[in-house]
Amino acid sequence: MLVDFNDLSETSRVWIYQANRSFTQEEIDKIKEQLNVFIVQWTAHGADLKAGYEIKYKRFITIALDQNVNQATGCSIDASVHFIQKLEKEYSVDLMDKMNVSYKQGEFVAYKSLTDFRKMAKNRAVSPNTIVFNNLVTNIAEYRTDWEVPAKDSWHNRFLN
């Protein structure tokens, strides 16, 4: 059951997929169509899942699931992973690699490997106040408050010393 992302409860579980490049507006329009179809058909043991999504900064796909209605199961999570893998192939983009870091440079979102981000921190090219994206948040409440934060307030802080 597809619902507006903003209508989901604060406890809804989130999965954040960051792209290694920005999507074009045409790609975003197509991805939204594909997400609409996927979420409408997404089920757990035949039960509808109340879910929504948003695409931010032309780079992040966030899928949220209200588990107060129906819980995600191994099969439903596998289905969402397969859907994301299909998007990766179709758009020649990496969405699953968790060993990369996205951060803001002004209004621009930069994307680096964890190794490169470490080097940048060591060389002071990023600071404790650099806005990073903490893709480890688990629910909408955390997503709204702890996803886009200064590096000093995130797990990225370990590289700043």
Image (tube, rainbow, N blue to C red):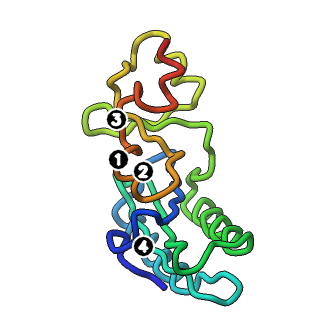
- On the image, the x and y values in percent for residue 130 come to 35, 27
Q: Which amino acid, by three-letter code, is at mark 4?
A: Lys
Q: What label sits on residue 17 in the rendered view?
A: none
Q: Which of marks 3 and 4 is nearer the N terminus?
A: 4
Q: How crowded is mark 2: few (under 14 residues within 10 Å), some or many (20 or more)?
A: some
Q: What label sits on residue 142 in the rendered view?
A: 2
Secondary element at image label 4: helix
Residue position marked by numbered label 4 in the rendering: 32
Which residue is painted at 58% across and 29% down in the image?
A: 114
Q: Which of marks 4 and 1 is nearer the N terminus?
A: 4
Secondary element at image label 3: strand
Q: Quadrant of residue 86?
A: bottom right
Which label lies toward us, 4 or 1? 1
Residue position marked by numbered label 3 in the rendering: 104
CA gap, disc 4 and disc 2: 23 Å
- On the image, the x and y values in percent for residue 89 come to 63, 61
Q: Which of marks 1 and 3 is nearer the N terminus?
A: 3
Which label lies toward us, 1 or 3? 1
Q: In which quarter of the image is residue 141?
A: bottom left
Q: Which amino acid, by three-letter code, is at mark 3?
A: Lys
Q: Nearer the viewer, residue 138 or 39?
A: 138
